[in-house]
Every structure is written in C-alpha cells, then in structure tokens.
Image (cartoon, rainbow, N blue to C red):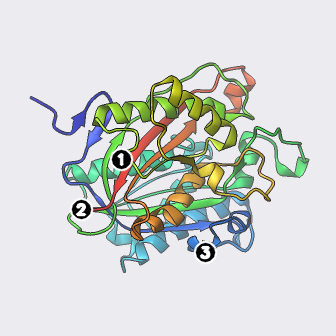
Amino acid sequence: MVNQKKQGLQTIIFEEPPVLTAWATIVGPKEGEGPWRSDFDWIMEDYEFGESSWEKAESKLLRETVKLAVSKKNYQPEDIELLVSGDLLNQITSSSFAARELQIPFLGMYGACSTMAEALLTAAMAIDGGYFERVVAAVSSHHYSAERQFRFPTEQGVQRSMSSQWTVTGAGAVVLEKGIYGGPRLTCATIGKIIDLGQKDANDLGSAMAPAAADTIKTHLSDTNRPSDYYDLIVTGDLGKVGSALLKQLFIKNGVVPEPNYSDCGVLMFNDNQDVHAGGSGCGCSASMLCGPLLKKMVQGKIERLLLVATGALMSPTTSFQGESIPGIAHAVALENP
C-alpha cells in the first residue's frame, strides 16, 4: 500500500490541512522593547507576573496565552479537545502545571527550542488523522527560569560570552481546527533528525543547531520537490547571529541555491541597541515571533508561504558537565494562505 501522507524521507503531507484559526502571544518587558511591540498581544510589566517565583510566572505565562488564544474564537478551555505543549524546564513543569489549571487533555512535548514546530506538527497529525477537530499547540520560555536551570542564576552576575543568546521570555499558542475555511493552513511538515557535528560549547548553541536546520531545510525541499525560492520566507527558530551566518554557508555547501529568502527569529526578536549578544533563543522565541508579527503578515497577505524551522539543542547541564557534544534537531512546518 502506498502511503499517501508521507512524501520522501521525512515529510508529512496533510490531506486536509488544519487551519490556524486563532493565536496569541505574551512576552516579557525586554521583548516588548524590541521592534515588534505593537504585534504582541500582551507585554508583561515585570518578570514575576504576580507570582512568587520565575517558574510559577512562566507557567502562568503559558496558561494565560492559551486562554487568550482560545478566547479569540469565543471558546472556553473546555471546548479544546487536546493541548500539545512544552517548555525548557525539567519535566516540562511550566506546561504540565498550566495544563493542570486548564483541564484540557494534554500531550507534553520536549524538543528544547524546536518545541513549537514539534507541537504544531503533532497537533496537525492529530487533526488530519481524524482523531480531533480542535487542538491547541503552545510553548513557553522565561529568561530567568532558563538561566537558573541551564547556566548560572542571574544574581551571580556571570559574564556571558558574545556567542551566547538571550532566552526569550514569551509564550505562543495556536488554535488549529479541521474543516474551517480561511486563515493560514498547515500543509506539510518535515520531522527532523538529530545532527551532531561535535560542538560542545553550551555558550554557542547557534553553531550546534545550524547543521540540523540545514539538513531539515534541504530534506524538506527535496521531499516536496519545491525550489528554494518557493517560500516567501524561511525562518529558523533561534540560531542567532552566529548560527544564522553558519547556516548561510551550509546552504551553499549543501546545494540549496539560490539562497532562499531567509531570516531567524532569534535575530529578528530584538533590535541592535539591546544587549542580547548573539540574539534571542528559547521555546518562546519562535513562538512569539510566529504568533506575533509573522502570522500578522500572513493575514495581511505580505507573506503567503512561510516555512518555520524551529531548532533545538538537546543537551542538559549534566551532559555538558560530562563533556558530551550537543545534539541538534530541527523540525519544519509549512504554513500557506488558501
């Protein structure tokens, strides 16, 4: 039997592409000072968000973003059949604690900073497979909770290297539905494979993830028989300035020519006057850019075809201390206007 839904090596083609019917994003104060302030739904006044810890603040951030996205369709949380969500913290507690309050059937995801694309493609598979008709994909990250877990508590004042990136405080949530006309459709997705070229520097995650992004983009274009200029924009999740520069070199090496109209959420998130070194990172980086300016541009018709390639570094503090290299992953989702 020929599998009509799988094309090429790693790509899924959705026979009835789910439609993105609503989305929302909430970001932190620093993100609100960047170039996209007017495109975010809500900018937090401070990083505590009315809670007693940064971890509790992040869970609230995710929970309120899901509620906001759902409310845009005049739905209640109980109208959602499935929540597919993840974050950066151990045991994805931001997501599970948010799901505890929302009381929506829950699938937890961990793909590091690639989790938004992973959640979107999983939600789309659930809908296209006929199992659900209304699913929310959502992720979050918080600068201070992530720094405390992966690097050093900010109170220590440890100097960051210039190749390091600023974990975005932000969350994005998307409502995907079946049988709804209008709005961007998630037409296909490419599941990435782990690429590890031996990079061990946890302060340069962009370089660790760029080879995975290059591999997934090339595979996606090959699987779908699409030219490299098919998309109005190919945007990676959070390679930052260092990883983006490397990816452009890998486009040439891997034969992805002409070079696509390409950018990176980690580069776009902040302006040059903000001290974020190599750019933004975190689950919330690609999610906030997608659910803020990028989908807004799709609705306006400024972008008709968008390929979101969210990237993740699948390491932990323990593996870094043990001298392990950093595995990279990238998943791609294609969003197209009808």
- Residue placed furthest toward the bottom: 74
CA gap, disc 3 to disc 1? 30 Å
On screen, residue 210 above or below 114 = above
**Which residue is painted at 40% across and 51% down in the image?**
120
Image quadrant occupied by the C terminus: bottom left
**Which residue is painted at 50% across and 44% down in the image?**
310
Residue 268 appears in the figure: yes
- On residue 122, the disc is 1
CA gap, disc 3 to disc 2? 30 Å
- Do the residues under discs 2 and 1 have CB atoms within 8 angstroms? no
Q: Nearer the viewer, mark 3 or mark 2?
A: 3
Frontmost residue, 81 versus 128: 128
Residue 314 appears in the figure: no
CA gap, disc 2 to disc 1? 14 Å
Count neighbours of disc 1 (C-alpha within 10 A) and say few if under 14, some if 14 to 19, many if 20 or more.
Answer: many
Whichever of labels 2 and 1 marks the residue nearer the N terminus, that label is: 1
Q: Is residue 292 left or right of residue 191?
A: right
Count neighbours of disc 3 (C-alpha within 10 A) and say few if under 14, some if 14 to 19, many if 20 or more.
Answer: few
Image quadrant occupied by the N terminus: top left
Whichever of labels 3 and 2 marks the residue nearer the N terminus, that label is: 3
Q: Which residue is disc 2 drawn over?
A: 178
Count of marks overlaid on the render: 3
Q: Which residue is disc 3 drawn over?
A: 38
**Looking at numbered disc 2 in the image, what kind of residue is underneath it?**
Lys
**Which residue is painted at 54% across and 40% down in the image?**
311
Q: Is residue 61 left or right of residue 157?
A: left
Count neighbours of disc 2 (C-alpha within 10 A) and say few if under 14, some if 14 to 19, many if 20 or more.
Answer: some
Looking at the rendered structure, the secondary structure element under dot 3 is helix
